[in-house]
Amino acid sequence: MKKIINAPENYVDEMLQGIYAAHGDQVKYVNDDLRCYCTANKKDGKVAIITGGGTGHLPLFLGYVGDGMLDGCGVGGVFQSPSAEQIYNVSKEVEAGAGILYLYGNYTGDIMNFDMAAEMCEMDDIETRSIVGADDVNSNANPDTRRGVAGIFFMYKCAGAKAAQGGTLDEVLAAAQKAKDNTRTVGFALTPCVIPEVGHPNFTLGENEMAMGMGIHGEPGIWNGPIKTADELAEESLNTLLGDMPVAEGEEVCLLINGLGATSVEELYILCNSVRKILDGKGIKVYRTFVGEYATSMEMAGASISICRMADDEMKAQIDMPVKTPFYTQA
């Protein structure tokens, strides 16, 4: 294991200390718990949006806390859920009089702990709603049990914009739901990653082998086989995406090409070019393209492709809304 760390057991907290040291004007922690991650610029009267999940996916999850997006995040260990108490403490800190939306990935531990936090908030007369991202098409045929991966970015974006515009709790939930209904993702891995406290790769792939559908925690995909070209990966991925969510000629989508941690930006743009050629050939219009690291898996090499169908002009305006966080800025 080659990592720039001190002790593996201090990996998460020392990472958080570094973030607070660098960005203390934008984010803070509460109750002396580094893992209760909150905006430093609370806005009274606004619906608060809280996310959470395991470390190892930056900028997901905490990287989207900031102006125009989220208000707080419960931070778990590497690939581990935050505790219900941490989520509750974040909720108490960022709640601003208009209720809270819990928006997080569709993973068992997260669901359990967010549900417990919601019950704790209810006892304090704090109104909450919950929604999970579940965009990973290859993870399950049943949309309700799919994993939440990079496509949750569009849910953050739309819900965050609606909250910033002064929307009610139900309106913010509806914005997140619309983004969820119109977003699909396909991902693939070329190498494993190493969890610091484990010290060895969490799965194995041969020298010229890749995994289609591999999850961001190393969950098994739908096939392992020889590495395909960017054009071939784009074609298979779009066949899966558009097979699950048909997009008609003339309709508009946002495109997200996401790196998993160890894939060069150059490779992501090669993949972007391959995807765009196919979409253009089908007459599908691309409203906006996002390329970079939006949801990683430590130092895993690989990428994911997400499409978000633009349901209406309101959704486009939400996608275009300015955002400023320590990890993501959109003018």
Image (cartoon, rainbow, N blue to C red):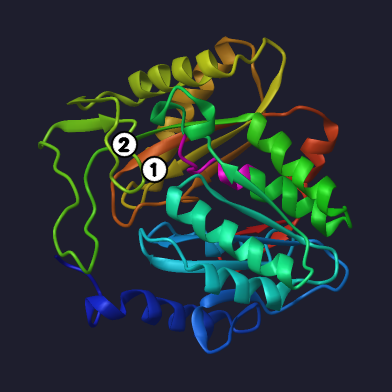
Q: Residues within 10 Å of mark 1 (few under 14, many from 20)?
A: few
Of residues 152 and 233, the one drawn nearer to the viewer in this rendering: 152
Residue located 41% across and 39% down the image:
268
* Mark 1 and mark 2: Cα distance apart in space: 22 Å
Q: Position of residue 214 (x, y in %)?
A: 31, 36
Q: Is residue 99 visible?
A: yes
What is the chief secondary structure element of the magenta stretch? Answer: loop
Of residues 167 and 64, the one drawn nearer to the viewer in this rendering: 167
Question: Mark 2 — residue?
Answer: 214
State left or right for residue 79 relative to residue 69: left
Identified by mark 1, the residue type is Glu
Q: Is residue 236 depicted above or below 63 in this figure?
A: above
**Quadrant, the N terminus:** bottom left
State left or right for residue 80 relative to residue 229: right
Identified by mark 2, the residue type is Met
Tell me the magenta residue range.
146-154
Question: Mark 1 — residue?
Answer: 266
Q: Is residue 60 visible?
A: no
Is residue 153 rendered magenta in the image? yes
Residue farthest to the left, as pictured: 207
